[in-house]
Image (spheres, rainbow, N blue to C red):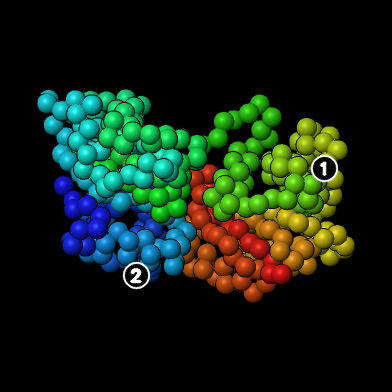
Amino acid sequence: MLPKEGSDCTLSEFIFTSAPEASAMALNELSKAGVSSHLKSWLAPGVGLCVSSESQASCQERLSAFPPVFIRHLCFVQTSRKLEPVVETTQLCAQQLVSELPKLASDRSLAVQVRLFRRDDEETAWPWTRQELERAVSGAVLAEHPGTLLSVSEPQQIVSVVCADGHVYAGVSQVADNLSAWPGGERRFAREALVVSRAEFKLLEAIEVFALDLPRDGQALDLGAAPGGWTRVLRSFGMTVTAVDPAQLSPAVLEDPGVRHEATAAQAYLRQASGVFDVLVNDMKMDPRASVALTVSAVRALRPGGIGVLTLKLPTHTQERVVAASLTALRSVYEVTGARQLFHNRSEVTVALRRPQ
C-alpha cells in the first residue's frame, strides 16, 4: 500500500490516459512540465502507471502550470493491492480500498469511477463487472462517510479505481486535478436521431472541457460548416449561425431559420465579411498551417472578448512540433485558453481561443 497524501514520504504514483498513438507524447509532456517521474508499466494501450519522487501536490502544481495537451485524464494512486480472487469478495475489496483512502470531504459531491483492463494473455477475468465494483465502492463510501452526496454527472471529487495487471489501484482527487470529470477522459454522448455527424461530439466536449460560456442569442460564425454538425450544436445553445461552406448543409440544418448559409469558401467570405460575431468555430479539414492562418485572419470578424474553437488536423509525424508552432501563431492575435486532444478527436487537437478585450 502507498503512503497516504500528507505523510512524510513524497513518493507518489499516478495513472494517465491518452490516445494510444499519442502515449509517447503524453509521457514527454510530463517531462516538459518538470514532473519527476518514470513509467512503471503500461496497464493498457494509452494507459500508463507512473511513479514519481515528488508528492501528489507537487506533481499537480507542475501540471497546472503547464497544462498537458495529449494527456486526457490523470488520477493519483493512494492505495493499491494485488487481487486475491479466491478469498476477496467484491464487498471486501471495496471496503478495504475505501478504508485506505484519504478522508473524503462529505460536503462535496462525489462520483466513483471504475475502469477494468485485461491483457489478452491473462487466463482469468476480473471477479466483478465495472458496475458491480462501482456499486460496492459507492456503498463502502456511504458506510464510512455517511451523508456523502453521490453525483455521476456533476461530481466535485472522484474516487478512481483501476483494475489492471492483477492489481487494483485507487485514489481520491478533485475533479480539476483529473483533467476530466469522466473515467479515463472518455466523455460519451447519447447519439440522438437528429445528429448530423459525429463531429458534433467534438464541439460538445470542447464546450464542456474548456468551460466555454456561449452567449445565448449571440451570433456565431462556422467556417467550413458542411454538413452542419457544429452549426447544429451552436443552434442548440440558442445562437444564430452564419454557416460558411460551398458544400451543401444537411436539410434539417438548412431549413432552420436561425441558420444563414453562405455557399462560398471561408477565405472569400472573410475578405468581404462586415459582421462581428460572438463565437467563431473552424473544424475544416486542411493543413494545420493553413487552418491557423485562416483563423488568425478571421480575428477581425470576432468581437473583443469573443470565443473561438479550432480543430488542428495533425500530420502523422511531428505532431508536437506542429501543435507548438500552431499555438505560437494563434497567440499572436488570440488568448489560447485551452488545448487538448479530446476523446472525440482522432488525429487532432482542439484549441479554445478568446479575442483580447
- Judging depth in this view, the residue of 261 and 79 nearest the camera is 79
- Judging depth in this view, the residue of 319 and 195 nearest the camera is 195
Q: Give the quadrant of residue 349.
A: bottom right
The residue under the point 13% across, 31% down is: 84
- Judging depth in this view, the residue of 357 and 95 nearest the camera is 95
Q: Give the quadrant of residue 275.
A: bottom right
Q: Position of residue 80 (x, y in %)?
A: 20, 44
Q: Judge left or right: residue 57 versus residue 249.
A: left
> Which residue is tagged 1?
259
Q: CA distance from mark 1 to mark 2?
A: 47 Å
Query: Tag 1: residue type?
Result: Val
Q: Judge left or right: residue 276 versus residue 56.
A: right
The residue under the point 57% across, 31% down is: 190
Query: Residue placed farthest to the bottom in the image?
Result: 332
Query: Tag 2: residue type?
Result: Gly
Judged from the image, the secondary structure of the residue bearing numbered disc 1 is: strand
> Which residue is tagged 2?
34
Judged from the image, the secondary structure of the residue bearing numbered disc 2 is: loop
- Judging depth in this view, the residue of 338 and 281 nearest the camera is 338
